[in-house]
């Protein structure tokens, strides 16, 4: 399945309502930057670790208006993932962006997209070049917000992190708790990916995934390829598993030109309620 950008068919070609770069803020949050269906800001959290392992914690908070949605790192059948550029930051050696577990929703064109509604915080883990000094994040953010149509959204955000305790610590910690935890195929657990296999049906290769989850919870499974150029279909529930297993399948479609599935490492994310796990699995 080739990548689809059907959301562009309804694109509102308007000048984005961002107001340029915000003034540098040394505090607990930057100012909100408003767009048509959403707003965005940076929030600060307290630091973790000792002098040699100190990590500054922060978050990108996106507030979506009722009925609006935005996309995960892999958008599904349509849409675009957010782009976060921290190149203009000061005293920043690295920024790691974490993604809380997403949800699946209809894209309005017969397919399904992956993302968030309401308010979402993407946790940020920042390593300073000089650990004893504050670090200033300067973020160039590009993302999409969708209701009946999708519009491009932009924000230029700036915030200085000191590592002090923050009123946003609980919000960041809640978002961190929703980030899928690393796991391995075959592990035990309330939520687990028990087996991954391949089969051919009607001449088409597909991947079969067996998942266990707490009774009564709805399970979602997402599949990503080894690079952003892969556009794998969303896994769909199928029959054939013995309870409490739930079985999913997806075709090995949407590979980049010249790529082969054999030897590729897929990233599988399973979500059930507030639990979420992430498994890296190499296809033989």
Image (cartoon, rainbow, N blue to C red):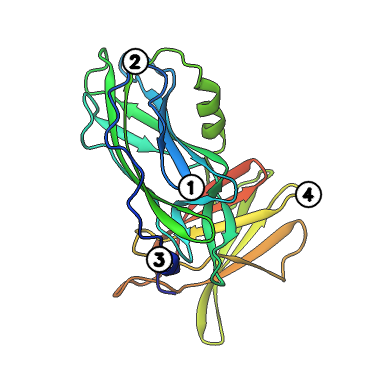
State the mark number for residue 169. Answer: none
Front: mark 2 or 4 = 2
Crowd class of label 4 (few under 14; some 14 to 19; many from 20; radius 10 Å) = few
Front: mark 1 or 4 = 1
Residue that mark 3 sits on: 8
Residue in front for this viewpoint, 216 or 207: 216
Where on the picture, by quarter, is residue 21?
top left
- The CA distance from mark 3 to mark 1 is 16 Å
- The CA distance from mark 1 to mark 2 is 31 Å
Residue that mark 4 sits on: 215
Apparent side of residue 190 relative to residue 249 in the rendered image (left or right): right
What x and y, as percent, mark residue 131?
Answer: 27, 17
- SS state under label 2: loop
Residue that mark 1 sits on: 37
Ranked by sequence position, the earlier of labels 3 and 1 is: 3
Pointer 2 and pointer 3: residues touching (CB < 8 Å)?
no
- The CA distance from mark 1 to mark 4 is 36 Å
- SS state under label 3: helix
- SS state under label 1: loop
């Amino acid at each position: 399945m080739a990548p689809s950008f059907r959301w562009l068919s309804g694109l509102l070609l308007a000048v984005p309502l961002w107001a340029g770069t915000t003034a540098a803020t040394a505090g607990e949050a930057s100012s909100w930057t408003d767009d048509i269906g959403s707003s965005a800001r940076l929030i600060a959290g307290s630091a973790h670790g000792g002098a040699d392992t100190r990590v500054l914690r922060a978050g990108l908070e996106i507030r979506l208006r009722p009925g609006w949605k935005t996309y995960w790192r892999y958008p599904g059948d349509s849409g675009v993932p957010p782009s976060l550029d921290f190149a203009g930051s000061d005293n920043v050696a690295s920024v790691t962006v974490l993604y809380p577990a997403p949800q699946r929703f209809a894209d309005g064109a017969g397919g399904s997209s992956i993302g968030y509604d309401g308010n979402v915080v993407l946790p940020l883990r920042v390593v300073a070049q000089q650990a004893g000094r504050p670090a200033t994040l300067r973020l160039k953010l590009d993302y999409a917000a969708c209701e009946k149509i999708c519009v491009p959204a932009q924000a230029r955000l700036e915030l200085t992190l000191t590592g002090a305790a923050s009123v946003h610590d609980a919000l960041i910690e809640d978002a961190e708790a929703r980030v899928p935890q690393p796991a391995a195929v075959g592990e035990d657990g309330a939520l687990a990916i028990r087996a991954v296999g391949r089969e051919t049906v009607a001449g088409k290769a597909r991947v079969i995934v067996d998942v266990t989850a707490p009774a009564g919870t709805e399970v979602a499974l997402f599949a990503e390829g080894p690079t952003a150029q892969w556009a794998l279909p969303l896994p769909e529930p199928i029959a054939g598993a013995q309870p409490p297993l739930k079985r999913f399948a997806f075709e090995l479609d949407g590979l980049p030109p010249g790529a082969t599935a054999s030897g590729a490492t897929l990233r599988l994310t399973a979500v059930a309620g507030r639990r979420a796990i992430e498994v890296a699995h190499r296809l033989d």
